[in-house]
Image: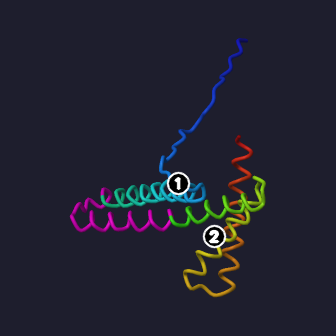
Amino acid sequence: MPISSFSGALTTPKVDVGIDMGHPLLNHTVDGFLKIGAVAATRSVAEDAYHIVKDGNFSRQNFERTLKKMCKEGAYWGSVAGVYVGMEYGIEKIRGTKDWKNAMIGGALTGALVSAVGNNNKDKVVMDALAGGAIATAAEFLRYRNS
């Protein structure tokens, strides 16, 4: 019986933003803001486009609402990502090592900060800090696993 095999690799494109803010911390923060903000804005547009096409309701009002939502989502998620990336980079420089603990601490601080800005109570801030740390740590473990 013939034996066949398949060999290959799946890679994702690497997108780098070439904005120099004059300091590596600012460069990382702006890069995170732009990348994740663009993803969030694109998701928002895709979601609204689906609903507009599904309902057949093409109007200027829907277009303007979609544009506002796209900007709001992009700015929000871009800001959260920028804070996280900046925190993780800063912690890496303070600790002098690059490992998963930087992601955990950066995620926890970002989760707490974003929650506190939203005027949440103390328990919610703690829960969001734990969630942020857990999500960032899991993402870092997955990245190490796949590299």
Does 59 sit left or right of 52 as displayed?
Answer: left
Q: Residue at x 52, y 54 (%)?
A: 31
Q: Nearer the viewer, mark 2 or mark 1?
A: 1
Image quadrant holding the C terminus, namely top right
Task: Compute the Cα span from label 2 to label 1.
Answer: 16 Å
Pointer 2: what residue?
110
Residue density around tag 1, few if under 14, some if 14–19, many if 20 or more, within 10 Å? many
Residue type indicated by callout 1: Asp
Query: Residue furthest toward the front?
Result: 22
Does 26 sit left or right of 98 as displayed?
Answer: left
Pointer 1: what residue?
31
Question: What residue span does the magenta drawing correspond to?
Answer: 53-78
Q: Name the quadrant containing residue 75.
A: bottom left
Q: Per the image, is 55 magenta?
A: yes
Q: Residue at x 32, y 63 (%)?
A: 67
Q: Secondary structure at mark 2?
A: helix
Residue 57 vs residue 9, the one in the foreground = 9
Residue type indicated by callout 2: Thr
| Residue 111 screen position, x and y as percent | 64, 72
**Vertical position of residue 4 compared to residue 134: above or below:** above
Does 18 sit left or right of 120 as displayed?
Answer: left
Q: Name the quadrant containing residue 123.
A: bottom right
| Residue 25 screen position, x and y as percent | 60, 59
**Vertical position of residue 109 compared to residue 7: above or below:** below
Q: Earlier in the sequence, mark 2 or mark 1?
A: 1
Residue density around tag 2, few if under 14, some if 14–19, many if 20 or more, within 10 Å? many
Contact (Cβ within 8 Å) of mark 2 with mark 1: no
